[in-house]
Each structure stands twice: as C-alpha cells, then as structure tokens.
Amino acid sequence: MEEIVNRVANSKLKTIDLEDYYPAGERSVIDIAQWLLHGLVLAESRFRESVKNTDFTVYQNHFVAVTCSTDAIIPQWAWMVLQAALTGIAQRVVLGSLEDLETELYHDVIKDMDVSAYLNLPVIIKGCSNKPVPLAAYTKLTAKLQGTARSIMYGEACSAVPVYKRK
C-alpha cells in the first residue's frame, strides 16, 4: 500500500488566517440617540450633563463604536465630547458601526504586519471565519502582500481562487 503524502503540507504554500489576528477585547456600541430629545434633537446643556453623569468606566479597555441609530443631525463637537469622555478608559473609540470598528482594528493589525516571511511564495488568504473579519481586511492584506508574495489566492488549499500572480 502506498503512503499517503500531503502535498499541500510539503509545498511552499503559506496560509494566512485573518481570524488568527483578531484583536482580543470586548466590543461595545454607544448610541448617542439615548441622549437626544425624542431621539432627534441634541440640546447642548442636557447632552453635556448626561455625558457627565454617565459611568464610562464600564467601557474600561473595550473597543467602542460610537454611533447614532436615528436620522438626527449631530454637531461635530458632540462626537468629540464623547471621545474626550472615553479617552483613557476605552482601548479604542471609532465613530461608526461595529463593522467600522472591526475595519479600523484590522487596518492597524495589517499595517503593522510583517509579511517578509511570504517573500516570493504562493499565499492563500483563508476565507470563512468564526470571528467578524471585515471584507476590508481581505483587501488591505491583498494590497500589502502584492509587493511580497509570488501569488495570492483566496479560500482553502483544495479550492483556492486565484487573486493575484506576479508577472
């Protein structure tokens, strides 16, 4: 009987699973609408008092998305007031949705990623993850790898989709 050989394991093919780079930490959303009159009108003195009386320490070391769930027009300074209240408490604050937050976190991860180990090698960026890896992370990683990898594919070794091949 012939020995079964795992050709993928023996190849130079490298796999990157963005889920492995998922920034650990609690995610939270703060909806500014809770401090608006009828969810639509920002009254400055009432808003400032509400923010002042909010215990933001519950967001200690959290990654926080600050958003507004209504169609209210929020003045720019209000977002700044919330940022100031969360500085030194939250690990990171992003204006937008949880997906915007994940995109920003992955932007930082990929910006700092050392891709020299993939020099002139074929790379598969693994798809399908259990953690919320935003689409933008895949595109940012592709852009970063293009100057290094010989080729980039998406998916799994058994069914990878070609994305890029250096000429």
Image (cartoon, helix red, strand yellow):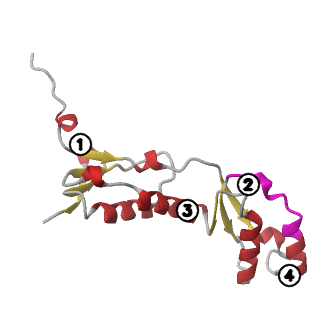
Between circles 1 and 3, the one closer to the viewer is 3
Which residue is under mark 4? 44
User: Is residue 52 one of those drawn in magenta?
Assistant: yes
Compare marks 4 and 2 and give the one earlier in the sequence: 4
Compare marks 3 and 2 and give the one earlier in the sequence: 2
Compare marks 1 and 2 and give the one earlier in the sequence: 2
Which residue is under mark 2? 59
* Secondary element at tag 4: helix
**12, 28: nearer the viewer:** 12
Give amino acid for label 4.
Answer: Glu
Give amino acid for label 2.
Answer: Tyr
* Secondary element at tag 3: helix
Compare marks 4 and 1 and give the one earlier in the sequence: 4
What is the span of residues highlighted in magenta in the rendered image?
A: 50-61
101 to the left or right of 77:
left
* Secondary element at tag 1: helix
> Few, some or many C-alpha atoms within 10 Å of disc 3 (few <14, some 14-19, many ≥20)?
some
Q: Picture quarter containing residue 115?
A: bottom left
